[in-house]
Image (cartoon, rainbow, N blue to C red):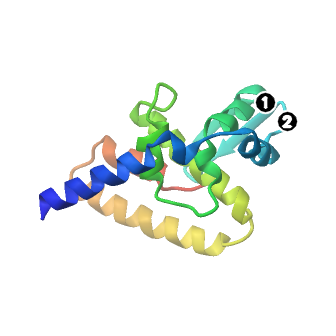
Amino acid sequence: MKKMFTVLLSIEFLICCNPKNMKQDASKRSVNSKYYTKLDTVMITTSVDDTIKYNKKNFNELIDKHPEFFQDFPENPDKFYFCFGNSAEFGSEAGQDYYYTLYTYFLKQRNGFEKYTEQRSTLIHIFSNINSIFGHIAYGGTYFGHQQKKNSGIC
């Protein structure tokens, strides 16, 4: 069973990481350009008071480099991170936290900031409590802090 799971997971990653699936042609770029900013600085703040700052040029380049943030149907961000985000830009554990924060930010942009506010807050609260319990059971560690950042969502 374990071997079968590993084989299926490997096949999924091969399919998802295939450049044809995320081809960035001119039409895709023009569709994503609606997310470009006109502000000098974009500040993204999470519910755990972590802030990411991008200047206009870097933010717009980020949009061009990562079309996976703008898929029609959201998918597991782990899949996208391991296929497209695990690079020099987001290669560390903290980089992975930033990738997940950006994924959430763009998903929330598409869904609307006000829509699902109560449900989002409830889910974040539940996850935080569960993560905290497991952190206490394991006597702490950096894993739980990173989990909190990845799953805290955007304020």
Q: Image height check: is 104 above or below 97?
A: below
- In terms of secondary structure, where does tag 1 sit? helix
Q: Which residue is under mark 2?
A: 39
Q: CA distance from mark 1 to mark 2?
A: 6 Å
Quadrant holding the C terminus: bottom right
Q: Residues within 10 Å of mark 2 (few under 14, many from 20)?
A: few
The answer to the question of whether label 1 and label 2 lie on touching residues, with beta carbons closer than 8 A, is yes
Q: 130 and 35: which one is in front?
A: 35
Picture residue at 44% right of the left edge, 49% below the top: 16
Name the kind of residue labelled 2 in the image.
Leu
Name the kind of residue labelled 1 in the image.
Lys
Q: Is residue 113 left or right of residue 34?
A: left
Please provide percent x and percent y for residue 59.
71, 33
Please provide percent x and percent y for residue 41.
78, 32
Please provide percent x and percent y for residue 39.
85, 36
Q: Image height check: is 120 above or below 12?
A: below
* Residue 155 appears in the rendering: no
Looking at marks 1 and 2 on the same chain, the residue that comes earlier in the sequence is marked by: 2
Q: Is residue 15 left or right of residue 134?
A: right
Picture residue at 54% right of the left edge, 72% below the top: 122
Quadrant holding the N terminus: bottom left
Tag on residue 35?
none
Give the residue at the far right of this rendering: 38
Q: Residues within 10 Å of mark 1 (few under 14, many from 20)?
A: some
Q: Which residue is under mark 1?
A: 56
